[in-house]
Amino acid sequence: VVVDRDGFALYFSRSPIPHGETARQVAYKHIGLYGYRRDFLSQFTSLPVGPLETEEHLEQLRVLENGYRIKLLETDRDTIGIDTPEDLERARGRLELCEL
C-alpha cells in the first residue's frame, strides 16, 4: 500500500509499490481489516467497479476510484490471513494456543 502524509491510502497493489531505483525501502503489510458505516456499505454495493479494481482484484480500490478515502492505521501485532478453509483452521489453532 502507498500512504500519503496524513495516513490515507493512495493505492493498493498485489505487487511491490512504489517501484524504482529511488523507491523508499519501507514496506507495509496490508491486513485488510475494514470498518465501514452501514450507510456507506449500502452505497458501496452500487459503486461501479473501475479499471484498477478489475486489474488488481482488490475491492478497496473501488472505494478510492470513486473518490472516497481510506484511513490507515499501523499495528505491530502479528496477523494471519484467512482466505481458505485451511487458513481458517490454522487461525483457530493459533487462537487456541493464544498466539494472536
Image (spheres, rainbow, N blue to C red):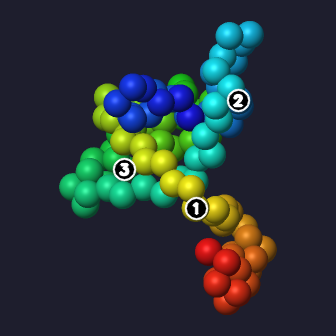
User: Dot 2: few (<14), some (14–19), or many (≥20) neighbours within 10 Å?
Assistant: few
Tag in front: 1 or 3: 1
Label 1 sits on residue: 77
The residue that appears at 51% across and 54% down in the rendered structure is: 75
The residue that appears at 58% across and 61% down in the rendered structure is: 77
Label 2 sits on residue: 16
Q: Quadrant of the N terminus?
A: top right
The residue that appears at 36% across and 42% down in the rendered structure is: 71
Picture coordinates of residue 91 (x, y %)? 68, 76
The front one of 84 and 30 is 30
User: Dot 1: few (<14), some (14–19), or many (≥20) neighbours within 10 Å?
Assistant: few
The residue that appears at 34% across and 30% down in the rendered structure is: 6
Give amino acid for label 3. Answer: Thr
Q: Provide the secondary structure element on which disc 1 rests.
A: loop
Is residue 64 found left or right of 84 in the rendered image? Answer: left
Label 3 sits on residue: 45
Spatial CA distance of label 2 from label 1 is: 21 Å
> Which numbered disc flags the more N-terminal residue, 2 or 1?
2
Q: Provide the secondary structure element on which disc 3 rests.
A: loop
Give amino acid for label 1. Answer: Arg
Picture coordinates of residue 60 (x, y %)? 47, 42
